[in-house]
Image (cartoon, rainbow, N blue to C red):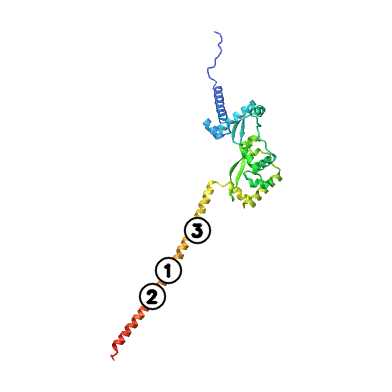
Amino acid sequence: MGEYEQISLVPDLGGEIEEEDRIRKREEENLVESLLFSLGRSVSVEEIATCLNMGKDGAFLAAERLRERYEERQEGLLIKKLEDRYQMVSHPKTYEGLIRVVKRPQKPVLSDVALETLSIIAYCQPITKVEVERIRGVKSDHAVNRLVEFGLIEEVGRLEAPGRPMLFATTEEFLYRFGVNSLKDLPALPEEVEKLLKEEVTEELKDGFGLESDEAGATDEKTAEEEIEETAGEETEETVELETEETVGEETEEAAREEIEEEIEEEQREVLEEDLRNSTEEEAEEEANAESPET
């Protein structure tokens, strides 16, 4: 008999597992791709996790794999990471063709005044318009309104100060337009410039709103729970004060009433004594008349 070639009947389990894992990951990436395309906006990791029906860690890995795939392809689209969100965007190399279709520039044209105002807000956010004007030395209403119109800044709350002025901060659109993934990626300011900005903000908080910088920071970071506790404390103090006033008022009223009652009793006692004296004198006079002989 000739030699027979040995045939392995043991399946390549390792290879099958790797293939299944590759298919699963590609399906996850396809779902993320579909989600980003369908929504047409930046999508949070939480939304991606909901779409994939998995935890945030797995969703983050799937989104990163998809982003890297698009980055390697360098075709018409890219996946942009903005803070902890992802968005499908056009590749910069396609801008020229797109601009010819939409007939307008891809980026809003910002004046030097608007850029200066935007820079101050980016490095000092959250910040009020009055603080911006303090740093710039001129009115900034128009510049702030234009930046809001372009979607580069937005209102993020109000300062706990007289008039409750609006606080402004940059948006995701700002990150996208200036090509940074996070505010941490902004170029570092020279030390003297950063110090000057902080001094101007501190002075405006003190002069304009009567707040120290620490107080303003504490105000910005105050939680709803702290506000509730503070309100409850104020209500308690007010209640105690009212109760004290009521108690003092009741005690004063009681003392006055007792004094009046004592005066009435004194008057009644004097009247009774007077009546008693008069009655005694009349009886004595009658007895004297009865004992004296008739003339």
Q: Amino acid at mark 1?
A: Glu
Please provide percent x and percent y for residue 144: 64, 42
In depth, the one of 21 and 70 nearer the eye is 70
Mark number for residue 113?
A: none
Q: Are marks 1 and 3 in contact (CB under 8 Å)?
A: no
Screen quadrant of the N terminus: top right
10 Å neighbourhood of mark 2: few (<14), some, or many (≥20)? few
Q: Residue furthest top?
A: 1
Q: Are marks 3 and 2 in contact (CB under 8 Å)?
A: no
Residue at 50% x, 58% y is 241
User: Pointer 1: what residue?
Assistant: 258
Q: Amino acid at mark 3?
A: Glu
Please provide percent x and percent y for residue 251: 45, 64
Residue at 45% x, 67% y is 256
User: Pointer 3: what residue?
Assistant: 241
Count of numbered circles in the view = 3
User: Pointer 2: what residue?
Assistant: 269
Q: Secondary structure at mark 1?
A: helix
Looking at the picture, does residue 53 appear above or below residue 261? Answer: above
As measured in the structure, the alpha-carbon distance from the residue carrying label 1 to the one carrying label 2 is: 16 Å
10 Å neighbourhood of mark 3: few (<14), some, or many (≥20)? few
As measured in the structure, the alpha-carbon distance from the residue carrying label 1 to the one carrying label 3 is: 26 Å
In depth, the one of 221 and 277 nearer the eye is 277
